[in-house]
Image (cartoon, grey):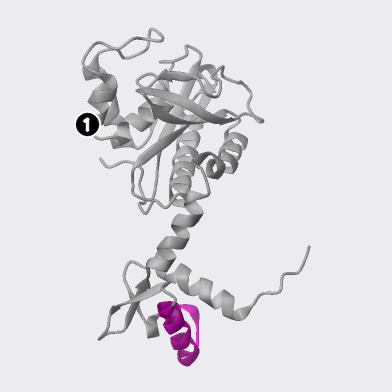
C-alpha cells in the first residue's frame, strides 16, 4: 500500500472545517483547541487565516466565536453542482444491491410519473423488468410513493388529480383517500412499501432523497420477490434503505437526520 505523506497545516485546516461543520453552534478558540488538541497560538493564526479567506466567520465579536463562512458554502455548492444525483448515488446503489441481493432503483418525478434513472442488479437473485427511462405510476410504486410522501399536500393533489386513479394490479390503491392514507402512514413509519401494487410478484421498500435545501428530489427503492419476503428480511432491508437514503441525502447537502416529518 502506498504511503501518503500528509501536510500538517493542511490537515489542521480540514480538521477545523469538519469540526465546525458538525458543531451545533459557533465555537470559541478554546473549544477548537480542546477538540483538536491544538496549541492556542497556532490555532488562533489558523482561524484568523480562514476568516480572512472567507471560510470562517466570527459570529460574536465579544466572545470571539467562530462558524463556517460563505467560502465554505460556495466550495460545497461548487462540488454539488458538478456531481449529479446519479453519480453520487451509484456506489451507494451498488452497495445496497450487494447487501440485500435485490435490485435497487433510483427515480425522479417528471410530469406526474416516476422515471427510473438508474438501477443496481449485479447481486440480484431476481431482476425486475423496469427499464431505465421508463415511467410508472407514482401511487403504485415504492419509488413513487416514497417521493409523494415527502412532498407537500398541494403538490400531491396536483400530481394525483381528483379523479379515481388507475390500477396496475388487484392490490393497487385507486381511491384518492386510500392513497392519501397510505402516504400518511409512510410519513409516520419513515419508508414506503409497494406490496404487489405495481407488479404482482414484487415487494418494494423505498425512501425519498433530499437536497441541500431539504427538498425531495429523488427516491430509492429495493425490489424483492414477494415470495422471498419475511419479517426478518423486511426489517433488514428497511434499515438499509433508510440508512442509504439518509447518507445520499447528506452527501447532497441535506442537514436533517430523519427522512420524513411525522
Please state the horizontal and vertical placement of residue 27, each as a whole percent of the image: 35, 77
Which of these two is toward me, 246 or 67?
67
Residue 181, percent from left and from top:
24, 24
Q: Is residue 168 visible?
A: yes
Residue 181 visible in image: no
Against 26, residue 109 (above or below) is above
Residue sticking out furthest to the right: 1
* Picture quarter with the N terminus: bottom right
Near mark 1 (Cα within 10 A), the count class, few <14, some 14-19 or many ≥20, is few
Q: Residue at x 44, y 56 (%)?
A: 77
Q: Is residue 44 magenta?
A: yes
Prevailing SS of the magenta stretch: helix
Q: Quadrant of the C terminus?
A: top left
**Looking at the image, which residue is at 21% across and 16% down?**
162
Viewer-proximal residue among 17 and 188: 17
Residue at point 27%, 42% (across, down): 261
Residue 186 x, y percent position in the rendering = 32, 31
Residue closer to the observer: 176 or 66: 66
Residue 33, placed above or below residue 202: below
Seen as rendered, the residue at the extreme top is 170
**Is 252 within the magenta?**
no
For label 1, the SS is: helix
- Magenta segment: 32-52
Q: Is residue 123 left or right of residue 88?
A: right
- The picture places residue 218, in percent across and down from the top left corner, at 42, 36
Nearer the observer, 112 or 144: 112
Residue at the (37%, 31%) spot, across then down: 146
Residue to which mark 1 is pinned: 153
Which residue is at the far bottom? 41
Query: Please, is residue 2 above or below residue 9 in the view?
Result: above
Amino acid at each position: 500500500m502506498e504511503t501518503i505523506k500528509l501536510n500538517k497545516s493542511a490537515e489542521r485546516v480540514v480538521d477545523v472545517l469538519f469540526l465546525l461543520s458538525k458543531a451545533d453552534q459557533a465555537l470559541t478558540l478554546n473549544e477548537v483547541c480542546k477538540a483538536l488538541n491544538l496549541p492556542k497560538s497556532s490555532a488562533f493564526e489558523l482561524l484568523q487565516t480562514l476568516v480572512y479567506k472567507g471560510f470562517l466567520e466570527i459570529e460574536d465579536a465579544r466572545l470571539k466565536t467562530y462558524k463556517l463562512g460563505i467560502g465554505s458554502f460556495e466550495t460545497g455548492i461548487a462540488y454539488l453542482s458538478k456531481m449529479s444525483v446519479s453519480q453520487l448515488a451509484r456506489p451507494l446503489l451498488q452497495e445496497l444491491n450487494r447487501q440485500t441481493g435485490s435490485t435497487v432503483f433510483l427515480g425522479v418525478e417528471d410530469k406526474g410519473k416516476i422515471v427510473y434513472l438508474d438501477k443496481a442488479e449485479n447481486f440480484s437473485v431476481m431482476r425486475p423488468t423496469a427499464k431505465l427511462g421508463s415511467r410508472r405510476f407514482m401511487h403504485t410504486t415504492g419509488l413513487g410513493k416514497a417521493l409523494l410522501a415527502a412532498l407537500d399536500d398541494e403538490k400531491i393533489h396536483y400530481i394525483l388529480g381528483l379523479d379515481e386513479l388507475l390500477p396496475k394490479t388487484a392490490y393497487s390503491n385507486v381511491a384518492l383517500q386510500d392513497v392519501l392514507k397510505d402516504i400518511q402512514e409512510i410519513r409516520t413509519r419513515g419508508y414506503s412499501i409497494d406490496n404487489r401494487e405495481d407488479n404482482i410478484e414484487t415487494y418494494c421498500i423505498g425512501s425519498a432523497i433530499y437536497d441541500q435545501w431539504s427538498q425531495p428530489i429523488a427516491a430509492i427503492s429495493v425490489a424483492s420477490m414477494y415470495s422471498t419476503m419475511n419479517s426478518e428480511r423486511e426489517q433488514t432491508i428497511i434499515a438499509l434503505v433508510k440508512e442509504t437514503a439518509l447518507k445520499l441525502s447528506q452527501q447532497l447537502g441535506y442537514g436533517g437526520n430523519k427522512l420524513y416529518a411525522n
